[in-house]
Image (tube, rainbow, N blue to C red):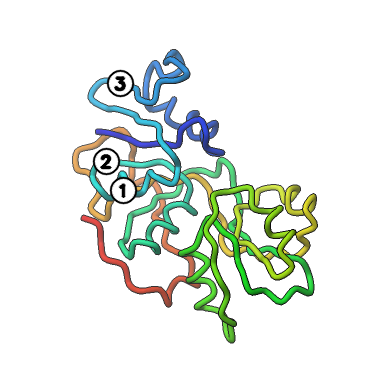
Amino acid sequence: MIVAAPGSSSRLYGPVRDVVGSLFAGLGEAHPRSLWHRSGDDTLVFCRGFDVPELVASEAVDVGITGYDVCVEWWLAHGRALRMHALPAIRTSFVTYCTVAGREIDTIYTEYPAITRAWLAARAEARPVRIVQLHGSTEGVIRADRHGAGVLLVTSGETLAANGLDVEVPLLATDVCVVTRTSPPRGQRLIDLDALPVLGIPGFCDSAPQPERVA
């Protein structure tokens, strides 16, 4: 079986490495630049956290370990369902709408365009806004744009406060999860999927197009 997990550039690398370290013997002795590790019949590959759902859906890997937020974003963006299982809480964060009080918003900057569109569609009387996809470190851009807001990943809130973003609306809580196709891999014994709770997508996503199942 092949498992994909976030690499060293990811915020989840440390917590996830502890998880996979318990599954793959000898991982602690691997070269720090190595992006793959084999233990018996199982292989671990490290990649970008946002790429994990794509690798699972494309059948390049059998199982992924990444953030719930990443899986929901992929699900909504591609209109294809994945199967997500909760792990014990490791690093809980929140996908959060943020801006400066009193602004009239016409642009939302975000790493989560699909989640943002679903949230806006579910709101009553939501006015049209432009969505600009960025890839992190957007707080300064939001603060500088007098009509700007953001949908960002927030853990402590310190960066929001430091940049004067004083309106926060959490959209969903996220932590590390296990992701597979909707038909989980047969015969794998590395992770007891049946013992892990199955996660759905947030309620505000109900109005999004019904996704196809990923076999």
Q: Earlier in the sequence, mark 1 or mark 3?
A: 3
Q: Is residue 170 left or right of residue 38?
A: right
x then y, percent, for residue 22: 43, 26
Q: Which mark is residue 62?
A: 2
Q: Residue at x 33, y 54 (%)?
A: 83
Secondary-structure class at tag 1: strand
Residue at 56 percent of width and 61 percent of height: 172
CA neighbours of label 1 inside 10 A, class few (<14), some (14 to 19), many (20+): many
Q: Amino acid at mark 2?
A: Asp
Residue kind at label 3, given as amino acid type: Ser
Distance between the alpha carbons at the discs numbered 3 and 2: 15 Å
User: Tag on residue 180?
Assistant: 1
The C terminus lies in which quarter of the figure? Answer: bottom left
Tag 3 residue: 39
* First in residue order: circle 2 vs circle 1: 2
**Could you tell me residue 57's position as x and y percent?**
28, 50
Asked if the residues shown at circle 1 and circle 3 are in contact, with their CB atoms under 8 angstroms apart, the answer is no
User: Horizontal and vertical percent for residue 35?
Assistant: 39, 25
